[in-house]
Image: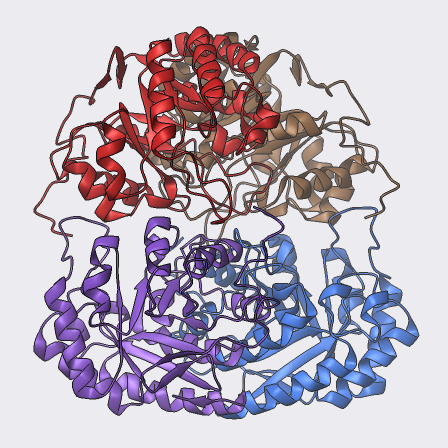
Chain colours: A purple, B blue, C red, D brown
């Protein structure tokens, strides 16, 4: 690396924390924001039910995948462009901005036409052509940490977006791969304070992919808020047992509502608010 | 393993959470207990100052090592029997029970004559002759998870103590070894809810060894309490920069007092009290 | 995954080992093939010198990067299309087919016009749009294992290419990320016999990225051949100390020639030949 | 650590490789020595059959556990003192020195009365009272690397023995714990050349515990010899499917004999001999 260039992700470059505004939702401020919704958009009914439920419980953005990176090419790959439309309609009806993954440069234009935040998944954290292309547009980006990426690698991946002039980048921790098997991944809770010291970018946590089992999600979510996370992204499905993907780690609407009440108390305990 | 023997660590074996009473301090109840003190007992003045400071800030037990497992045989190895006496005297003066490590079967009798809780360090988690010997006496045991031990291995290590008839066992998480280097170890926060579901034994967390840097300790401590830990064990030194070991991760008395105030609020947010 | 579809990577699907012919070089047969050359194509002189040197020492293909996935966007990113031309010219002059990385769907046509094997790097192992696009053409693909990918994930990534009808896929191990720091990555030598049992695809090893230090490369290369690898891909630079990337792990021509002699003996010891 | 003390494990301290002579078997010389035998001594017949079989196939020492560190206290724990006697008798009858594990300081005297090499298992690598006690006697020690120990920690553990004056220490790699599950542990093959450069102590490899499955043992054993190991320790059982422990990773006598022939060829390819 060229030691003479100070990277844009550094706190020294931008001492005040970056705020990313998405509609009425501001990430990186005093409020801890919760993005919630299903792993994948499956149908009009499913995404509308999910959107209404998470809005009612206090979520301030809706998630839902239309382009799904699946281990097998024969698994359900998402609804594609139709899924983006269903998601955007459901978000609008519930008054929530929407967050969705983009996997290919060729899809960016279509996705950003309707989505408020473009997510880069863990598998694509170092897909540099994709990151560069996202730097050339101005929709906010939610960049997930790769399963074995160091924090330096995560920050330098963000730099690929920032270097293009898009300064609306949020980082998201979702668990790392270790020898442990009692959770799907190991939530690296210590990365939160380390990142908050090194960068001005908002730091979110995905407790669902870390946990892998819905009964563990609330404890991880509370821990993330207590450790200083600026937001969460949580999988919620109207009927988790029927989900086409990630059902085991998805909360039902009732479980999500309970968790939000707990989180509100924890957020206050650390001097913040929820949503 | 013999599938017909139900291990004593299982919640099914003992549905109500085990409470370990050490003087007035009860681990495993509604109160989150904080054990604090220096890595090693270094001198009369140092351990008395530490004991007074942590007691004033609300700690309910005093820690301090007299037998230190060091990577190099040429490093400071602790004061041995004299250290145990200094620790016990300082605890008595401050009104705190004391917790200290025991590394060898031959030292158990001497250590338990003056200590209230016998700690088994991460390096000795599967030192089975030591565990068996601790099962033959009745002083409570604090068993730390090995750096790459699975939760099953931790629970079965506890079984070596329980099988001997000593049911006063507490588990302690202190971070696992992963590819990450931004913290000394990776605090496996998800292990807290998993263990609480599987076992009736109290679950403590050592945020100091996980963090490796004192500025990260409060965030990890808050996360542990939010995730459901029954207690913490924290390194505090009257003058961390002069500590003979682990100074970088030791809080000063003022930093510890601030942290305790934060933790008290977080404990209440999850329906518990501190100390 | 759909349990009814038998994946094409399985040995059951194709009991005889797949042979990938690239000019006169056949991967997956009795001969252990060695691909060698610099990390990056830097100049006409550099790549011609490298090509001549590795051909003389017995390599049967030339490697060299023109599109480089670098951690920082400000590091040297490769010569792009010009690099591809320089590489192809140097390979032709030395009588060697050429292997080079492709990072973006948009670059595939241009790269395959001049390259004999298209490499997918570890960071892109699960870049599924790229894998699908490579499945739609017929140039052989060298797919590197991601730094924390399981073998199942590697095989299913290959399936994305195979499913499109391109059955010329080779797998390449290059070390996994663990707690160890004495090598750049940990060469997972046990993955070789496991993959050879599960799949008919050729299995190569990159000892250079595993080692991270040139003095360790020969021992890892010997081990890989002894364990059953079908080939190696090795970094060789005419003047490693002046390399623009990966110099520390690049062999000089003399070191490479010595290693090839050792490897020839080891290949014979396990019933194979070199090149 | 005290920077002024040069540790005894360093090559600088002792530039010529240490040779450990055990009867006619010399570890650390040109010959690659193979220690073989069952995980545990189970009966007179079993250990005699194993001893005869491994001797016939070219092994130069007999292994067998009498004190077994098991995850559960209810699993078979070994025959204890009787097992030591059976092992020593079987070794004498087959003309082989014997290697066995010692877990407790209290057992050292009894075990060394009949065993030729005292093994310290991975779980006890940092059991410092045990290491110190082994430093006070003169029987050779085989020290296994802990499952997540760094090479520095392994070398400093050896220093605990060396510092006492026992310079007959051999190191043994047996796989590290990573995210991988296709082998029981991940054989860190790169540690062999790194250790050989840093220390004068012989470096052995245990392919059985690394593999976890007998069909993978020969490939790992060949790789270890090719990478420069000074010896191997291999599990062989007369009837693996009836073994009381580790049967899945134990070779049968015929499989061991075949492997020894392959290893002999590989040893010659790297300029050494077998046994």
The picture quadrant where one finds residue C193 is: top left
The picture places residue D36, in percent across and down from the top left corner, at 51, 24
Please give left or right for residue B105 compared with residue C160 in the image.
right
Tell me if residue C274 can be seen.
no
Please give left or right for residue A202 compared with residue B91 in the image.
left
Q: Residue A186 or C32: which is nearer the viewer?
A: C32
Please give left or right for residue C68 compared with residue A197 in the image.
left
Q: Residue C15 or D81: which is nearer the viewer?
A: C15
Residue at image point 50% right, 65% down: B188
Residue at image point 88% right, 41% down: D4
Q: Residue A181 or C14: which is nearer the viewer?
A: C14
The picture quadrant where one finds residue C11 is: top left
The picture quadrant where one finds residue D231 is: top right
The picture places residue B28, in percent across and down from the top left corner, at 54, 82
Residue at image point 82% right, 85% down: B52
The picture places residue D197, in percent across and down from the top left corner, at 67, 26
Which of the image's four quarters has the C terminus of chain A? bottom left
């Amino acid at each position: 690396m060229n030691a003479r260039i100070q990277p844009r992700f550094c706190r020294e470059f931008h001492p005040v924390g970056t705020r990313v505004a998405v509609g009425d939702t501001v990430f990186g401020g005093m409020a801890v924001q919760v993005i919630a919704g299903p792993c994948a958009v499956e149908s009009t009914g499913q995404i509308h039910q999910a959107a209404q439920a998470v809005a009612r419980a206090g979520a301030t953005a809706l998630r839902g995948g239309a382009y799904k990176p699946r281990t097998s090419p024969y698994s359900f790959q998402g609804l594609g462009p139709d899924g983006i439309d269903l998601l955007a309609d459901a978000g609008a009806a519930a008054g929530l901005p929407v967050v969705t993954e983009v996997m290919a440069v060729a899809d960016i234009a279509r996705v950003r036409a309707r989505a408020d935040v473009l997510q880069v998944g863990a598998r694509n954290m170092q897909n540099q052509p994709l990151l560069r292309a996202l730097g050339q547009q101005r929709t906010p980006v939610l960049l997930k940490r790769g399963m074995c990426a160091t924090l330096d690698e995560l920050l330098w991946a963000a730099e690929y977006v920032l270097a293009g002039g898009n300064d609306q980048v949020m980082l998201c921790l979702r668990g790392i791969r270790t020898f442990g098997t009692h959770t799907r991944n190991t939530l690296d809770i210590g990365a939160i304070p380390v990142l908050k010291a090194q960068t001005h970018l908002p730091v979110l946590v995905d407790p669902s992919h870390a946990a892998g089992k819905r009964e563990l999600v609330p404890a991880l979510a509370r821990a993330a808020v207590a450790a200083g996370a600026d937001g969460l992204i949580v999988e919620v499905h109207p009927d988790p047992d029927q989900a086409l993907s990630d059902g085991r780690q998805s909360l039902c609407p009732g479980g999500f509502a309970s968790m939000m009440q707990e989180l509100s108390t924890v957020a206050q305990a650390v001097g913040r608010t929820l949503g």
